[in-house]
Image: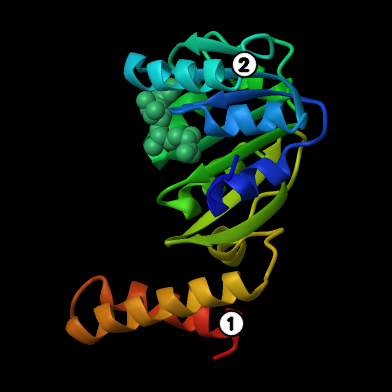
Amino acid sequence: MKLSKRLQAIYDLVDEKAIVGDIGCDHALLSCALVLNEKASKVYACDINEEPLQQARKSIQYYKLEDQIEIIQCDGLDMLPSDVDTIVIAGMGYETIKSILDKHPEKLKGCNKIIIQSNRDVEKIRKYVSDHHYHIQSEQCVFDLHYYQIIVFDCSNDSELNKKELLFGRRMIKDNVFLQMWFSNLKKYESILGKLSEKNEKYQIIYDIINQIKEEIEV
Ligand SMILES: C[S@@+](CC[C@H](N)C(=O)[O-])C[C@H]1O[C@@H](n2cnc3c(N)ncnc32)[C@H](O)[C@@H]1O
């Protein structure tokens, strides 16, 4: 099975023999790949909606993985069993991810890895992790038609992130994809700034971000 680059990057972050909660599993492609390749020993494929779960059921039946993938229809972590050691929450927006994380902190604490890929507002995810003093294990950028950032954390205690870390990450792999993503963001911010009057309240904010990006990627 061929995963998209984004899902492959998430797959690669899962530890061998993990017991995974794939929250918002949709088609369950990640769940199936994890079990098919014997990366995960068990996956709970969870989704709030019936329609994606019908698709998930088809994928699981197609690959004959019913013994190792259990489908659960629930909101976030509501019905996630306690043997899960790895949670994946991918392909959702910040508000949904926040509400899922907020509801069951005790389930997060029982995990070795919480892998988050928010489609937007990644700085807000970092702020959330920082405000809770959670520990970021690793971060990386992936380009798969869009730029995505993946954050892996656990609930061990860590210091709050500073302003620069909130924007660029604390344990980010600063590879070419990272540089290209911020170069692309820089061009977008410069274009926005070019259209704003200096009197606009957002001018200084965007001006400051541009300077931070230039300093970070040294352009
Ligand atoms: C865009 S899909 C992402 C699928 C997959 N995780 C990925 O990254 O490709 C988002 C999925 O999250 C599900 N979802 C949205 N809110 C949810 C919630 N509170 N709890 C569980 N699933 C949720 C949706 O039904 C949908 O199937």
Residue lying farthest bottom?
A: 219
> Considering the numbered disc 1 on the image, is that residue within a helix, a strand or a loop?
helix
Q: Quadrant of the N terminus?
A: top right
Q: CA distance from mark 1 to mark 2?
A: 47 Å
Query: Label 1 belongs to which residue?
Result: 217
Look at 72% across and 51% down and name the residue there.
Answer: 138
Is residue 147 among what the camera can see? yes
Q: Position of residue 135 (x, y in %)?
A: 72, 43
Q: Amino acid at mark 1?
A: Ile
Circle 1 residues within 10 Å: few <14, some 14–19, many ≥20: some
Look at 63% across and 75% down and name the residue there.
Answer: 176
Give the label, 1 or 2, closer to the camera: 2
Q: Quadrant of the C terminus?
A: bottom right
Circles 1 and 2, Cβ within 8 Å, touching? The answer is no
* 185 sits to left or right of 148: left
Regarding ligand 1, which quadrant of the image does it lie in?
A: top left
Residue 176 position (above or below residue 26): below
Look at 63% across and 39% down and name the residue there.
Answer: 115
Q: Residue 165 falls in which quadrant of the image?
A: bottom right
Query: Label 2 belongs to which residue?
Result: 64
> Considering the numbered disc 2 on the image, is that residue within a helix, a strand or a loop?
loop
Q: Position of residue 161 (x, y in %)?
A: 64, 55
Residue 87 position (above or below residue 153): above
